[in-house]
Image (tube, helix red, strand yellow):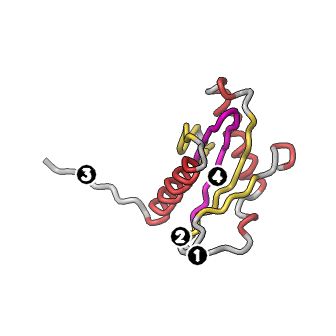
Amino acid sequence: MRSLVITLPLRYKRARRGEALVAAWLSHRGFHVIAQNFRRKSLELDLVAVKGRELLIIEVKTRSAPIDDWQHLIPPRKLAAIWRGSDRFLNEHPEYMDYTIHLGLALVTEKCGVPVAWMRLPAASDST
């Protein structure tokens, strides 16, 4: 019997490593990852984590080298898609509707002393 081997391109492997690193980083800070790669049609949320009554929706960007101007990695169209994805997640999981929701960008730099950098992304009304 033959076995099927699927090889992921390097960028997917790097992205998965970055998401795993951010999930561990969040766990170390007391968050519990409740969803990873939440996908519905064209919407995707990399990580969704909860701590107390706080819900984090996290976009993870993994790069091999440091980036000076990483705040601009999420264009307005992508930010709007992340907010639509978070709305979809909340519709499917109404138990989190009354939580405080934060949208964030976690940047993983593989060749850096501080592997995870974090910034909060603007609210939905700020993204238009």
Q: Earlier in the sequence, mark 1 or mark 4?
A: 4
Q: Is residue 85 magenta?
A: no
Residue linked to disc 2:
110
Q: Residue furthest top?
A: 95
Secondary structure state at the residue bearing disc 3: loop
Q: Magenta region, mostly helix, strand or loop?
A: strand
- Indicate left or right for 11 with 54 as reference: left
Give the residues in magenta: 47-62
Closest to the observer, 122 or 117: 117
Q: Which mark is in front, 2 or 3?
A: 2
Instruction: From the top left corner, tell me how far across and down residue 22 is, in percent.
Output: 56, 54
Q: Earlier in the sequence, mark 3 or mark 4?
A: 3
Secondary structure state at the residue bearing disc 2: loop
Rendered image: mark on residue 59: 4
Going 75% across and 47% down the picture, which residue do you hit?
80
- Indicate left or right for 8 with 29 as reference: left
Label 2 CA crowd tier, 10 Å (few <14, some 14–19, many 20+): some
Instruction: From the top left corner, tell me how far across and down residue 87 is, in percent.
Output: 71, 34
Q: Which mark is in front, 4 or 2?
A: 2
Residue linked to disc 1:
65
69 shown above or below 43? below
